[in-house]
Structures are given as C-alpha cells and as structure tokens.
Image (cartoon, rainbow, N blue to C red):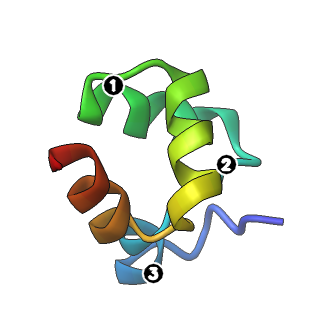
Amino acid sequence: MDNKDKVGAPDRDFINIHENYEVEYWANKFNITPERLREVVKDTGTSVATVKAYLNN
C-alpha cells in the first residue's frame, strides 16, 4: 500500500493505478480519461516518462 507520509521522487516517477487519486491526477495531467490511462499503463508500465512518451507518439 502507498505510504502517503513518504513522498518524493519515487512517487513522482511512477503511476500507482491502484490509488484513485493518482489515476485522477495523472489522467488530468495528460488530458485523458482514467480508463485511457489504465489502458496505456497496461501497455507501457507505470513509469511516468514512458507513459508520456507513448502518449506523445
């Protein structure tokens, strides 16, 4: 489970699709639906950089 007391670079580098607030945050950040974000993460993994690169192609 995500420890909300320990935030930092690891939390910013990966998307935890099991936490609704993270899914909402990243979906809004990438201007896509939460469902689309889950599909992309399924294809690419949880790295924010990888998801961003995938969406930019």
What label does residue 28 carry, if any? 1
Q: Position of residue 32 (x, y in %)?
A: 36, 22
Q: CA distance from mark 1 to mark 3?
A: 20 Å
Of all residues, the one furthest to the right in this rendering is 1
Given contact means CB atoms under 8 Å apart, are the residues at marks 3 and 2 in contact?
no
From the viewer's perspective, is the residue at label 1 or at label 3 nearer? 1
**What is the crowding at mark 3: few (fewer than 14 residues within 10 Å), some, or many (at least 20)?**
few
Please say if 46 is above or below 32: below
Q: CA distance from mark 3 to mark 2?
A: 14 Å
What label does residue 10 carry, if any? 3
Query: What kind of element bears circle 3?
Result: helix
The residue nearer to you, when weighing 56 against 13, is 56
What label does residue 17 carry, if any? 2
Query: What kind of element bears circle 2?
Result: loop
In which quadrant is the N terminus drawn? bottom right
Q: CA distance from mark 2 to mark 1?
A: 14 Å
Q: Position of residue 57 (x, y in %)?
A: 17, 49
User: In the image, what residue type sits under mark 1?
Assistant: Asn
Q: Position of residue 41 (x, y in %)?
A: 56, 53
The residue nearer to you, when weighing 27 against 53, is 53
Q: Position of residue 46 (x, y in %)?
A: 54, 66
- Residue located at (35% from left, 80% from top): 9
User: In the image, what residue type sits under mark 2?
Assistant: Ile
What label does residue 56 carry, if any? none
